[in-house]
Amino acid sequence: MSLQLQKYTETSLVDKQLIQKAIEYMLVYNLSVRQCAQLFKIPKSTLHRNFQKRKLQDDENQYKLLIDQLTTLL
């Protein structure tokens, strides 16, 4: 089995709920990606990629909220 196929198989088997739980643990307990990946037995790259997506989404939501608040003040 090639390395790329093996990585794809590993990441496709990871449950999305497990990834979300790992991200929540990272945020609540201030754990690193490496620590959480080891704790939940998730590939580090998968966890990091999903954490970055979550962070970007949270930032977008904060900007939208800020814009809404500013428009109501005007």
Image (tube, rainbow, N blue to C red):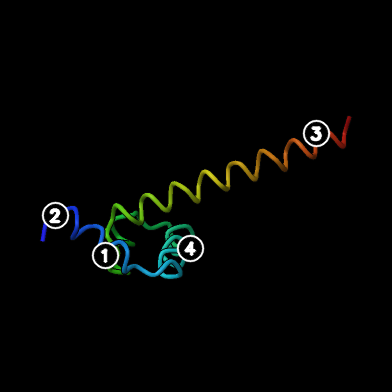
Q: How many other residues sit within 10 Å of disc 2, few (<14), some (14-19) or many (≥20)?
A: few
Indicate which disc residue 24 carries. 4
Instruction: Answer left or right for 24 relative to 49.
Output: right
Residue sitting nearer the eye, 1 or 71: 1
Identify the residue position indicated by label 1 in the image: 38
The first of marks 2 and 1 along the sequence is 2
Q: Quadrant of the N terminus?
A: bottom left
Q: Amino acid at mark 4?
A: Glu
Indicate which disc residue 70 carries. 3
The count of marks equals 4
Label 4 vs label 2, nearer the camera: 2
Residue with the most extreme left position: 1
Residue depicted at 39% across the width and 70% down the height: 15
Indicate which disc residue 9 carries. none
Q: Is residue 20 above or below residue 2?
A: below
The first of marks 4 and 2 along the sequence is 2
Q: Residue 61, position in %: x, y?
A: 64, 45
Q: How many other residues sit within 10 Å of disc 4, few (<14), some (14-19) or many (≥20)?
A: some
Residue depicted at 26% across the width and 58% down the height: 8
The CA distance from mark 4 to mark 1 is: 15 Å
Q: Amino acid at mark 2?
A: Leu
Q: Amino acid at mark 1?
A: Gln
Indicate which disc residue 3 carries. 2
Instruction: Look at the numbered discs 3 and 4 and tell me whether their residues touch, using CB distance below 8 Å.
Output: no
